[in-house]
Image (spheres, grey):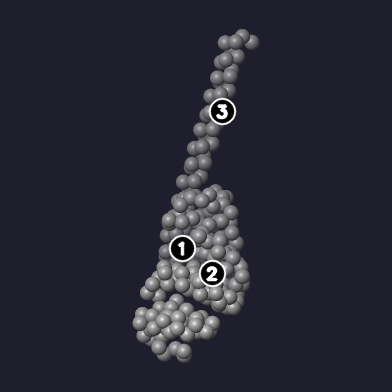
């Protein structure tokens, strides 16, 4: 085979390879588009409280795109609403596993999934697992710190509970319950001055707390 013929063969093979790569890219894009359509349909059905229909859409999306992190996350949320914590946790774990770290509502799917898993484990009474999930979540949310504070109190880690409730007041300065919990905790460790300060702050935000036993 002459040099010219060899060059033609090489160029033909290169063109075939490029065409195959381009075709594969188009197929992948088509799959992503179809999966996205199913995800959106699932969100629409969830808004209508058609939870079974929403799950069906998410499952179809996953069948098309097996690593679709958001579909697993959304399905976990549905199972949470349906009070099926183990199914929800399973979905959140897969959402975390397939998360590529892309921005999702100013955070990542992993961070939200860890937070939601914490809620599910909390509901199951598995406080250590719940705290582990909350700690892994990088959400800087007062709800997360308030939940953690309650859990640390339940396992009798008073210092960590105080730390979490104080963080709650920084992020939600008008949330009276957090101040009241700090009143209880400081009273428990014998710091009556700080306890009284938090009590006064709590009832200034919510006078109804006066009715609770001190």
User: Upstream in the sequence, badge 1 or badge 2?
Assistant: 2
Horizontal arrangement in the rendering, residue 106 relative to residue 185 (left or right):
left
Residue assigned mark 1: 140
Distance (Cα) linking label 2 and label 3: 49 Å
Residue at point 40% right, 70% down? 172
Residue at point 46% right, 89% down? 214
Label 2 neighbour load within 10 Å: few <14, some 14-19, many 20+? many
Residue 21 visible in the displayed image = yes
Q: Position of residue 189 (x, y in %)?
A: 54, 82
User: Upstream in the sequence, badge 1 or badge 3?
Assistant: 3
User: Can you tell which mark lies on residue 119?
Assistant: 2
- Is label 1 in contact with label 2 (beta carbons under 8 Å)? no
- Is label 2 in contact with label 3 (beta carbons under 8 Å)? no
Label 3 neighbour load within 10 Å: few <14, some 14-19, many 20+? few
Quarter of the image with the N terminus is top right
Q: Nearer the viewer, mark 1 or mark 2?
A: 1
Horizontal arrangement in the rendering, residue 169 relative to residue 135 (left or right):
left
């Amino acid at each position: 085979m002459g040099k010219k013929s060899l060059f033609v063969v090489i160029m033909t093979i290169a063109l075939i390879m490029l065409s195959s790569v381009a075709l594969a890219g188009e197929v992948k894009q088509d799959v992503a588009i179809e999966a996205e359509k199913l995800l959106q349909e699932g969100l629409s059905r969830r808004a209508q409280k058609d939870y079974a229909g929403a799950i069906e859409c998410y499952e179809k999306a996953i069948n098309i795109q097996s690593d679709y992190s958001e579909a697993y996350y959304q399905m976990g949320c549905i199972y949470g609403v349906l009070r099926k914590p183990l199914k929800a946790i399973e979905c959140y774990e897969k959402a975390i596993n397939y998360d590529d770290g892309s921005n999702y509502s100013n955070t990542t799917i992993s961070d939200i999934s860890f937070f939601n898993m914490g809620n599910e484990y909390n509901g199951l009474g598995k406080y250590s697992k719940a705290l582990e999930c909350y700690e892994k979540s990088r959400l800087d949310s007062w709800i997360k710190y308030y939940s953690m504070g309650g859990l640390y109190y339940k396992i009798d880690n008073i210092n960590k509970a105080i730390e979490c409730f104080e963080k709650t007041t920084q992020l939600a300065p008008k949330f009276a319950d957090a101040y009241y919990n700090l009143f209880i905790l400081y009273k428990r460790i014998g710091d009556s001055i700080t306890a009284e300060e938090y009590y006064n702050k709590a009832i200034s935000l919510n006078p109804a707390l006066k009715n609770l036993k001190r």
